[in-house]
Image (cartoon, rainbow, N blue to C red):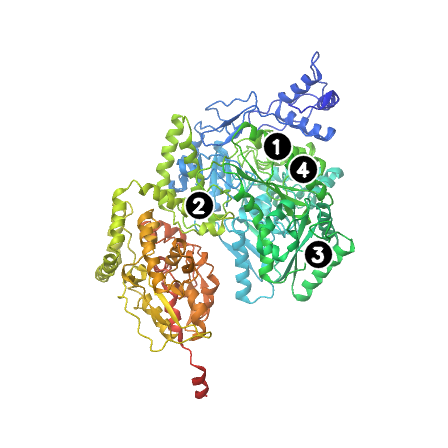
């Protein structure tokens, strides 16, 4: 219905609609229907009121309705309100508006979301692809199909089949079969897209989390070009380029142009498909402008390699219809001066709404390959599949400085951005609105750098500016240019109009720590809203852009809009140089009223951006499903028709991601809305962005943290239904059954997901809580845990003997019989018995009392060299492996280092029966864990004189467990991991020499979380010429879980790729070292072994002088 506009406006609507002529025929059955062509005629409706005639026109046809809405916006400068008569929740929890008169015919297939019923085509498709795609790469089970029905957007569609594709050949063979059977397919890389473009209720082709597949690359020459496959993470590509520059000592370090905030999670496939940009790349360095060549798999299975002249020549012949069609469209566009000017104007700013029509005007008609190549960019998988891309990279200048300049109002800040865009070569400018500044006020480090943001005016705003240079001189020149430009225009500075400031109050910071503070605040704006939102609501991110000279007006309109619709947590911030704003707010979809509010807001937002301010409804996040209904409104009918023509040329059967980018359903954006039900305080803040996934060791074998959370939420939703249907009851049972292994058993619970989570969720804590709930009913397990905790000294004494016995069998029988027997026992005991491997340890040597120190040295300040050493139960029980040339245990090496440095060592009482409790806690045995933790805390308090003496624990995960569980604050600051203690207390007391050429290091998860990666690498660097990081976020060992579920470590460590000259590896967790050794073929051991070998006691100054 049309919101009240008065008789005059209704008459205008009727006249506009009648001018289109003959009513367009219905398009409700399929996206594959031909796009309507406006005809002529006068219409009908004699005897009806003007309002009735207008309503009839709107109800006859969805396309006419959208055109009518567009006309109303344009002609009356008013928004159109969409009536939400009702909403429904499907079997998978997704919420959709139910338009009046819409019917879903169960079992009748239509190529429209929600209508893709199995009529035999999916069975035929699966049968045919099974000839080359093994069943273990095809997922139809309830857990994984639901898990892949979630991406970073606020939409949900449940695929019928998920296929993990491994290479271009898979795609070449699958697409013709999909076309043959009329089965739509959607490609997905990392699933970090925000507009719903990586979802389907048909077949999802997953190219990430498939091991080493789609991860090949080639760096060309000096790094100014790189060829990559779509499964590589963007940040990973930049790290490869940086390593190339360091290895070859090249003068310039390069990076790829696009730099989205998800750079350490999103993949090349999505960046190309969405034409993603970011904070610094602007328009000029996005994929469209920096891509050199690509390999494309088209819907018929053919491949175009734009870097291969022979491939291009063949394609011109074999795909003449497509080539001629594209050239014809380009010819018409280039001849239409008005349309060509519109295209150039829109792509002068960020724009990912619709297709990349700039390809039709940027390249000559005699170069159709170049046009096709650039049309593929930003096409969101609807034209074909990009299996390889070659980028022209851009310099990453090492010299940088940042300033945070505050203005009393939005207009001044936006004017400043416009000045910087037009008059300087500044590298990056980020805009903050008042709501964003409010979050800055809560950051202590930020307020020290910019004191006057506290109590800023209601419409205050700020610009975060970054300048870069090849050297210090170039950097300073850029800074001076920025300051001169802003001063020249007499802009007001200061957070309060009543207390103006000079620009010098906001200096450029060269210090890396200060710059990091400024940019971390910017990166943290999205998670701050996500973390603070009401449980049960979703975090939404809209992405709009407009010409920079209109940015202030648009921003003020949007702020006003959010206030009127009661989105009080909304923030507007973004990439000011490109007029690009991100709108972040929370939204629930729990009731019809909430969906109505969202629908109304979307209509007005689209009007404000596209109609009123001539902007882009999507600046860099892609069209997806989110704004597909509004593409025509932004672009106009002429350009919109051309987009449909292009879709018809590339994909005439609508097999490739149908419904995305272009869609004739005006209500698409309020269908298949993803709920965010409150399920547990541990994970309620999760925004399902997927940033966590690249750190997860189980990502290639079962589920990722995001997927564990979303399936857990769904189980909780189903469990809480007041009157579940039989189908919902059966579904809950199936989800619970599948989740036990895929969700709980194969979660390492290491917490590395938290390190990349923008709202700092530790999914491992969720899994531990689930295990704890299960253990409440397992009386036998609880009793066994209690017995072990009470008699841990016996366990400590018995395990080394058992390991030595097994090692003897290994020596006699060899590795194969032990592996086979243990694997069989692992299966019949449901993973209770671990699977043996050749790098299993021998028993550790008994812990001996430290040698007495005659007269402990005293450091400067009179502090005695005393240390409390608590050997972990792991190092007390497990020694080196049989194949290792080292024979001593970890505690022997650490005691040697203490002695060299002149430290008196105190071993706490009862050390032989101590345990931090982690082995119980990870299994959900909370009582036993608490008991052992309390015992250890008491022993440490006594030995350290109430925390006055430093305490060293030789195993990083154990130290992390103790720090998390202790109740005495004084102990928290006395505890040290061995690397940390050596770096701070022993380095100046030891003489180091390099004893190895190349060594590998693996920093355990717990050490990474404690922030000692840098110290680890520096200490290793004192002992070896070359230090090679493992590059593995988590090895997947998780205590003994990797032995009981060896597929977990196999999944994680398949990515371990050490150089051939690297013969030794070092870590600080004995169990992790076992797994790393097994998968690398070299012995990993504690870093203390290397340091002990490389050090001698430092000579006293007097003795050294006497020797001279």
- Asked if residue 44 is positioned above or below residue 566 in the image, the reply reads above
Residue 101 horizontal/vertical position (percent): 56, 20
Distance from the alpha carbon under mark 1 to that under mark 4 = 24 Å
Residue 351 placed where, x, y %?
A: 65, 43
- Front residue of 129/892: it is 892
Which label sits in the foreground, 2 or 4?
4
- Circle 1: element type: helix
- Circle 4 is placed at which residue position? 560
Secondary structure found at label 4: helix
Label 4 or label 3, whichever comes before in sequence order: 3
Vertical side of 109 occupied by 1025: above or below = below
Q: Nearer the viewer, mark 1 or mark 4?
A: 4
**Residue 117 place in picture, x, y as percent:** 46, 28
Q: Outermost residue toward the top?
A: 47
- Residue 977 higher or lower than 772, as above or below: below
Q: Which residue carries the number 2 mark?
A: 705
Mark-to-mark CA distance, 3 and 1? 37 Å
Q: Which residue is mark 1?
A: 629
Q: Quadrant of residue 102?
A: top right
Q: Judge whether 535 appears above or below 513 on screen.
A: above
- Label 2 Cα neighbours within 10 Å, binned few <14 / some 14-19 / many ≥20: many
Residue of label 3: 425
The residue located at (49%, 32%) in the rendering is 94
C-beta proximity under 8 Å, tags 2 and 1: no
């Amino acid at each position: 219905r049309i919101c009240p506009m008065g008789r005059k406006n209704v008459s205008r609507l009727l006249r506009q609609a009648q001018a289109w002529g003959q009513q367009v025929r219905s398009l409700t059955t399929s996206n594959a229907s031909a796009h309507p062509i406006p005809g002529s005629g006068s219409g009908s409706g004699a005897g009806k009121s003007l309002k009735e005639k207008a309503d009839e026109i709107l109800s006859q046809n969805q396309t006419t309705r959208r055109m009518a809405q567009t006309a109303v916006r344009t002609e009356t400068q008013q928004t159109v309100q969409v009536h939400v008569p009702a909403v429904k929740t499907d079997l998978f929890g997704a919420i959709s508006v139910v338009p009046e008169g819409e019917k879903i015919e169960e079992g009748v297939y239509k190529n429209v979301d929600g209508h893709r019923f199995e009529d035999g085509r999916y069975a035929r498709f699966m049968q045919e692809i099974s000839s080359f795609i093994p069943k273990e790469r095809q997922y139809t089970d309830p857990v994984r199909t639901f898990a892949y029905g979630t991406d970073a957007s606020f939409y949900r569609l449940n695929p019928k089949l998920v296929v993990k594709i491994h290479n271009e050949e898979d795609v070449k063979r699958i697409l013709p079969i999909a076309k043959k059977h009329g089965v739509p397919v959607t490609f997905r890389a990392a699933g970090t897209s925000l507009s719903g473009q990586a979802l389907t209720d048909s077949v999802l082709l997953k190219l990430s989390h498939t091991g080493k597949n789609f991860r090949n690359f080639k760096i060309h020459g000096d790094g100014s070009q790189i060829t990559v496959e779509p499964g590589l993470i963007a940040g990973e590509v930049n790290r490869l380029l940086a390593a190339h520059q360091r290895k070859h000592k090249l003068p310039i370090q390069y990076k790829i142009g696009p730099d989205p905030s998800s750079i350490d999670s999103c993949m090349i496939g999505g960046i190309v498909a969405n034409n993603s940009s970011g904070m610094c790349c602007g328009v000029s360095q996005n994929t469209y402008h920096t891509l050199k060549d690509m390999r494309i798999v088209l819907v018929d299975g053919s491949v175009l390699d734009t870097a291969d002249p022979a491939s291009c020549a063949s394609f011109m012949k074999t795909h003449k219809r497509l080539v001629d069609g594209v050239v014809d469209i380009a010819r018409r566009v280039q001849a239409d001066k008005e349309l060509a000017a519109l295209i150039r104007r829109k792509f002068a700013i960020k724009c990912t709404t619709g297709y990349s029509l700039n390809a039709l005007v940027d390249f000559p008609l005699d170069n159709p390959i170049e046009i096709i190549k650039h049309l593929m960019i930003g096409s969101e998988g609807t034209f074909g599949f990009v299996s390889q891309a070659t980028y022209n990279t851009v310099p990453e200048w090492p010299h940088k400085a940042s300033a945070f300049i505050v203005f009393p109002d939005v207009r001044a800040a936006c004017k400043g951005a416009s000045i910087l865009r037009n008059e300087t070569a500044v590298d990056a400018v980020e805009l903050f609105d008042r709501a964003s500044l409010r979050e800055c006020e809560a950051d202590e480090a930020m307020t020290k750098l910019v004191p006057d943001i506290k109590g800023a005016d209601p419409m205050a705003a700020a610009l975060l500016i970054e300048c870069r240079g090849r050297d210090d001189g170039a950097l300073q020149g850029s800074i001076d240019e920025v300051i001169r430009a802003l001063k020249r225009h007499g802009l007001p500075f200061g957070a309060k109009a009543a207390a103006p400031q000079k620009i010098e109050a906001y200096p450029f910071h060269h210090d890396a720590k200060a710059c990091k503070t400024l940019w971390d605040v910017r990166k943290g704006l999205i998670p701050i809203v996500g973390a603070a939102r009401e449980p049960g609501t979703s975090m939404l991110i809209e992405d709009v852009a407009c010409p920079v000279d209109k940015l202030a007006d648009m921003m003020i309109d949007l702020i006003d809009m959010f206030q009127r619709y009661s989105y009080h947590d909304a923030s507007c911030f973004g990439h000011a140089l490109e007029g690009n704003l991100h709108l972040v707010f929370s939204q629930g979809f729990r009731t019809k009223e909430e969906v109505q509010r969202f629908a109304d807001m979307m209509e007005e937002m689209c009007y404000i951006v596209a109609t009123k301010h001539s902007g882009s409804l999507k600046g860099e996040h892609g069209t997806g499903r989110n704004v597909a209904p509004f593409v025509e409104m932004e672009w106009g009918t002429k350009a919109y028709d051309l987009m449909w023509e292009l879709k018809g040329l590339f994909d005439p059967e609508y097999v490739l991601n149908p419904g995305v980018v272009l869609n004739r359903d005006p209500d698409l954006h309020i269908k298949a809305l993803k709920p965010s039900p409150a399920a547990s305080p541990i994970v309620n803040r999760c925004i399902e962005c997927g940033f966590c996934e690249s750190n997860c060791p189980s990502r290639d074998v079962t589920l990722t943290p995001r997927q564990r959370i979303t399936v857990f939420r769904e189980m909780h939703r189903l469990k809480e239904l007041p009157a579940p249907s039989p189908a919902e009851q059966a579904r809950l049972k199936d989800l619970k059954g599948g989740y036990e292994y895929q969700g709980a058993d194969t979660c390492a619970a290491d917490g590395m997901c938290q390190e990349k989570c923008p709202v700092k969720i530790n999914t491992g804590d969720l899994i531990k809580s689930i295990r704890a709930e299960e253990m409440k009913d397992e009386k036998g397990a609880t009793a066994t845990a209690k017995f072990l905790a009470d008699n841990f000294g016996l366990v400590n004494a018995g395990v080394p003997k058992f390991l030595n016995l097994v090692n003897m069998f290994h020596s006699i029988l060899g590795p194969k019989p032990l592996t086979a027997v243990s694997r069989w026992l692992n299966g019949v005991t449901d993973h209770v018995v671990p699977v043996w491997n050749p790098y299993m340890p021998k028993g550790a040597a008994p812990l001996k009392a430290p040698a007495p120190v005659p007269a402990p040295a005293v450091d400067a300040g009179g502090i005695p060299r005393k240390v409390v050493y608590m050997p972990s139960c792991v190092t007390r029980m497990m020694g080196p492996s049989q194949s290792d040339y080292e024979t001593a245990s970890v505690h022997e090496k650490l005691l040697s280092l203490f002695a060299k440095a002149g430290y008196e060592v105190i071993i706490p009482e009862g050390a032989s029966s101590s345990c931090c409790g982690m082995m119980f806690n990870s299994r959900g045995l909370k009582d036993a864990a608490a008991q052992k933790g309390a015992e250890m805390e008491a022993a440490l308090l006594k030995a350290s004189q109430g925390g006055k003496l430093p305490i060293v624990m030789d195993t990083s995960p154990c130290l992390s467990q103790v720090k998390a569980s202790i109740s005495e604050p004084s102990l928290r600051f006395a505890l040290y991991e061995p690397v940390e203690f050596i770096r701070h207390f022993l380095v100046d007391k030891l003489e180091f020499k390099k004893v190895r050429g190349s060594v590998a290091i693996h920093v355990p998860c717990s050490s990474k979380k404690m922030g000692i990666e840098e110290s680890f690498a520096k200490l290793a660097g004192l002992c070896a010429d070359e230090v090679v990081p493992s590059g593995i976020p988590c090895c997947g060992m998780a205590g003994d879980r990797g032995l009981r579920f060896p597929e977990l470590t196999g999944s994680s460590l398949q990515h371990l790729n050490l150089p051939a000259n690297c013969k030794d590896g070092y870590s600080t967790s004995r169990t992790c070292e076992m797994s790393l050794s097994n998968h690398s073929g070299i012995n990993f051991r504690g870093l203390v072994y290397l340091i002990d070998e490389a050090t001698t006691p430092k000579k006293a100054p007097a003795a050294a002088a006497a020797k001279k």
